[in-house]
Amino acid sequence: MSDATNPAAPATRTVDGVELPMPGTFTLDPSHTHVGFSVRHMMVSRVRGRFTSFTGTVTVADEHTLSAVEVEIDLASIDTRDDGRDTHLRSGDFFDVEVNPTMTYRSTSVSSLGKGRYAVHGDLSVKGVTRPVELDVTYEGVARDPWGNERLGFSATAEIDRDEFGLGWNQALETGGVLVGKAVRIEIEAEAVRQA
């Protein structure tokens, strides 16, 4: 239903008390989307990074639990604010971007957790390995920008074991433990624009 006091407001429908967009396809807006990650370093802190080049679509279905997400990330675009570390991450020790230039995520199902939160189940493919990964997604709403484009927003988090994807390079520390943690936390803040 449209907002009668604001004709420019996008049409929405209420599902489980949440104002959701009408069905359709939305594409990620790279200038308003952050695809980041963090991992333990030397057992005492966290290193954060991001990928700056990616494409993706969000397909909103009439039955919202049948909605879908598909994302492709350019692994060479990794940025941890350290050129030497980024070069190492692109090498065969980690992503081996010359052989495996992209990482993909394709959802397989969506479960409502209530109050605008969803569990998105899907397959993450990295370096020739595909494994199931669940995203904890929070729907942030839908709005129309000053140029008439309908936008939806969401945030998502997940945690993966990098060893499971063939990214197991490490070094032991003299004080015990390892240089790089196994668990990688994925953090996404996204805006997507409705396609005609």
Image (cartoon, helix red, strand yellow):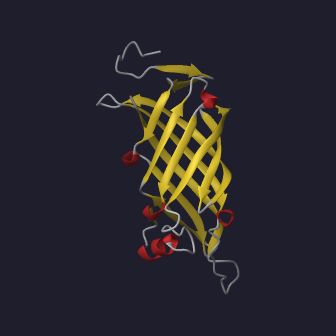
Of residues 12 and 109, which is closer to you in this image?
109
Place of residue 68 in the rendered image (x, y in percent of width and height, measured from the top left)? 57, 36
Residue 188 vs 20, above or below: the answer is: below
Residue 66 sits in which quadrant? top right
Q: Quadrant of the C terminus?
A: top left
**Which residue appears at 43% of the width and 16% of the height?**
2
Q: Nearer the viewer, residue 6 or 96?
A: 96
Residue that protrudes farthest toward the top in the picture: 4
Q: Is residue 184 visible?
A: yes
Task: Say which quarter of the image contains residue 121.
Answer: top right
Residue 25 x, y percent position in the rendering:
47, 32
Q: Percent from the top left, x then y, of residue 50?
A: 47, 59
Asked if residue 115 can be seen in this view, the reply is no
> Where does residue 6 sit, x and y in percent of width and height?
36, 17
Of 87 and 4, the residue lying toward us: 87
Q: Answer above or below: position of 27 versus 131.
A: above
In the image shown, does 125 or 42 lie closer to the viewer? 125
Total marks placed: 0
Please identify the residue farthest to the bottom as the structure is shown: 174
- Residue that sits furthest to the front in the current view: 99
At 42% from the left and 57% from the top, the residue drawn is 52
In-image side of 60 versus 2 (left or right)? right
Quarter residue 164 falls in: bottom right
Q: Is residue 149 left or right of residue 127?
A: left
